[in-house]
Amino acid sequence: MARTQAHWWFVGPALFLMVVILLMPIGIAGLLSFTEYSLGNPDAHWVGLDNYSKILTRSTYEKMFGATFRYVFVVVPLSVGLGLGAALLIHSTRRFSDLYKTIYFLPVMAALIAMAIVWEFALHPTIGIVNRTLEQGCGTFLETWGWYAEGCANGFPTWLTDRHYAIWTVAFIGVWQGFGFNMVLYLAGLTSVPRELYHAAEMDGARSAWDRFRLVTWPMLGPTTVFVVTISFIRSFQVFDTVEAFYPQGGGPSKSVYVMMFAIYEKAIQQNLMGIGAAITVVFLAFVMLLTVIQRWLVERRVHYA
């Protein structure tokens, strides 16, 4: 009897921690999402699905979903593609590869507040290096080729305060900050590709670098790519610190950068509306769970067909 129950002594602590640290907070958030609870209020008035109805019908939350999905569907493909490209270039480089790895990985390690200050100065509409560089480039093109550009004639936008550009600017910073992490993951995947496969492919007629990449590298990086894309999606949905650093008082101009994590922070922490904040949290967790299930399905499907 003692031997048959011995395994519980090993898995029991892990199960206990999983329930206390993971499942209980999710359950509490799920219950709060059906109430109008706020901190300091002894009662939690049950409102049913009203919080979810607000999320799906009000224009503020429509902007929240729009900003979140714009950010995600810009950052994920660009950060994955640039990470793969940087990994391939560094993997094929004989000299200074460690230096390149360090340079590309610096944005991942850098303190966000410091980087936010740097980007605010760089994107300043009058003294920022971005607009000044564009103005000089426009002058050169106009003098040399006589090209007309609207930005040259009317001035360049205020990247962080114009509602038409704010989300794309924040997404660009997200790509800059995240693709170095994907590069490291792809480098780990590239080191596990057997060199014999390249020799075999070359003997079968794969002479060019593109053929070797298409026939050997890319198929072997399949599991790594599934993992990188899933992690990139989850990290993109979790974007908060960049938005909070640039727009601490709101979700940017006209709520154009009002992403989900900032909405949770604003409703639950700033406005003490724990019920609606919990409802947004549940929706966010549903997105993350869906991505996890898709990743698991893709990995198992690949293993099954392999």
Image (cartoon, grey):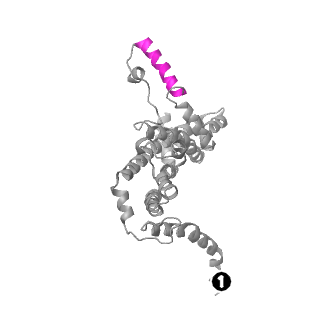
Q: Quadrant of residue 35?
A: bottom left
Residue 297 versus residue 64 in the image, above or below: below
Which residue is more in the foreground, 39 or 137? Answer: 39
Left or right of 15 in this view: 172: left
Q: Residue at x 47, y 41 (%)?
A: 171
Please provide percent x and percent y for residue 306.
46, 56
Q: Is residue 73 magenta?
A: no
Residue 65 versus residue 45 in the image, above or below: above
Q: Is residue 142 magenta?
A: yes
Which residue is more in the foreground, 96 or 35? Answer: 35
Q: Quadrant of the N terminus?
A: bottom right
Residue lying at the far top in this picture: please name it. Answer: 143
Which residue is more in the foreground, 287 or 269? Answer: 269
Residue lying at the far left in this picture: please name it. Answer: 57
Please provide percent x and percent y for residue 139.
46, 16
Q: Residue at x 50, y 46 (%)?
A: 249
Please provide percent x and percent y for residue 23.
53, 69
Q: Which residues are magenta?
A: 128-145
Residue lying at the far bottom in this picture: please name it. Answer: 1
Amino acid beneath label 1: Arg
Could you tell me if residue 204 is visible in this image? no
Residue 33 versus residue 241 in the image, above or below: below
Mark 1, other Cα within 10 Å: few <14 / some 14–19 / many ≥20: few
Secondary structure beneath dot 1 equals loop
The residue to which callout 1 is attached is 3
